[in-house]
Image (cartoon, rainbow, N blue to C red):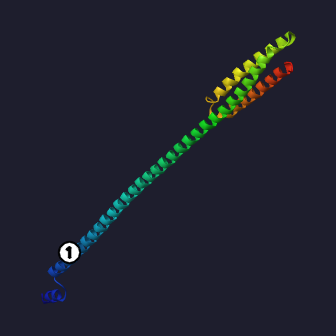
Amino acid sequence: MVLLLGLSACGPSEKEQKAKLDEIENKAKEQLAAAQKVSAEKLATAEKEIESLKAALEKAGADARAEAQTEIAKVKEEADKLEAEAALALSKARAAYKESANKQLQTLSTEANELSAKSRKAPAKSKAAIDKALKDITAKRQALQKDIAAIDKAAVEQLKAAKAKVDVGIAHLKQAIAGLRAKLPKD
């Protein structure tokens, strides 16, 4: 028994060992709790940063959409303005061309009317050819009037062809008038 008492006196008692173990366990629990607390705080901070980044990303996306829509509106407004200017320029060009063609037609019509008056004095043998030439001139004038009026209705892509048709009509009318003049007797 003395030996037992001596042995138990040498090392820590069971109670002391249990207390030491409890102390180590408590320290481990405290350290674990502290680590979990730090971990939870870091996680919370990371989640806040993620939410902040998401909000910034959404704001940047919304800002980019708004900026793009503003730019699209500006471009559309500019395109509309250019389209209106082009339409006005086209309208002015059509009107100027029609005015020029109508003046030429008026001049040629006056000339044709004067030749028609002269044709009444023509000899009977050339009367049939002159009447035929006068009818041809009348038909060409009417066709030219329709072609000039068609300038307003011609699509942009067809405007060049419509103008060419009027130019050809004017040239044919001039030829027909010159042909009539050649058939009339010289004064």
Residue at point 49%, 45% (across, down): 77
Horizontal arrangement in the rendering, residue 115 relative to residue 27 (left or right): right
Work out whether 111 lies above or below 127. Answer: below
Of the pair 122 and 128, the residue shown nearer to us? 122
- The image shows residue 140 at horizontal and vertical percentages of 74, 21
Work out whether 16 lies above or below 182. Answer: below
Residue at point 17%, 77% (across, down): 18
Residue 158: tell me if it is visible. no
Question: Which secondary structure, mark 1?
Answer: helix
Q: In which quarter of the image is the N terminus?
A: bottom left
- The image shows residue 81 at horizontal and vertical percentages of 53, 44
Residue at point 62%, 34% (across, down): 95
Residue at point 74%, 26% (across, down): 108
Residue tagged 1: 26
Of the pair 124 and 43, the residue shown nearer to us? 124
- The image shows residue 17 at horizontal and vertical percentages of 18, 80
Q: Quadrant of the C terminus?
A: top right
